[in-house]
């Protein structure tokens, strides 16, 4: 597991974490870029947010996480999931909004 990498969008257009990795050559290994291989699994945290963030994972992301045993069947059945640093996300699915600062750990 790496030290957290801070991604600070600072008003730049929204893009996925893997697009950030590609542009800034961060050492995150990933393969498909389409959400099917599961190689880009990361933990994320929003260090400046005080309130809980609930996210809707796509069926594709949930299916890949389940196939790699990175999500429970119970969580897979949910429509929304509380975004905490404990859960796994696929970096190629996580869109970093212009106002977001997030820490990424893998
Ligand atoms: S790069 Fe393959 S699932 Fe994200």
Image: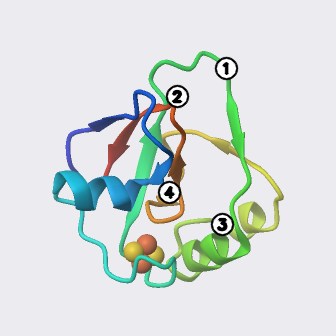
Tell which circle, 3 or 4, labels the residue nearer the N-terminal end. 3
CA distance separating discs 2 and 4: 22 Å
Q: Are marks 2 and 4 in contact (CB under 8 Å)?
A: no
Q: Which residue is mark 4?
A: 88
Q: On the rendered structure, is 84 left or right of 1?
A: right
Between circles 2 and 4, the one closer to the viewer is 2
Against 18, residue 52 (above or below) is above
- The percent position of residue 26, horizontal first and vertical second, equals 18, 54
Q: Quadrant of residue 28?
A: bottom left
Between circles 1 and 3, the one closer to the viewer is 1
CA distance separating discs 2 and 1: 15 Å
Q: Dot 1: what SS?
A: loop
Closest to the observer: 98 or 66?
98
- Ligand 1 lies in quarter: bottom left
Q: Which mark is residue 72?
A: 3
Q: Which mark is residue 51?
A: 1
CA distance separating discs 3 and 2: 30 Å
Q: Which residue is mark 2?
A: 99
- The percent position of residue 102, horizontal first and vertical second, equals 42, 35
């Amino acid at each position: 597991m790496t030290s957290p990498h801070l991604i600070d969008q600072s008003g730049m257009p929204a893009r996925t974490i893997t697009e950030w990795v590609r542009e800034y050559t961060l050492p995150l290994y990933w393969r498909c870029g389409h959400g099917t291989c599961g190689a880009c699994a990361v933990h994320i945290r929003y260090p400046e947010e005080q309130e809980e963030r609930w996210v809707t994972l796509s069926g594709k992301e949930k299916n890949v996480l389940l196939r790699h045993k990175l999500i429970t069947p119970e969580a897979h059945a949910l429509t929304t999931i509380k975004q905490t640093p404990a859960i796994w996300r696929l970096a190629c699915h996580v869109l970093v909004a212009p106002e977001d600062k997030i820490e990424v750990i893998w």
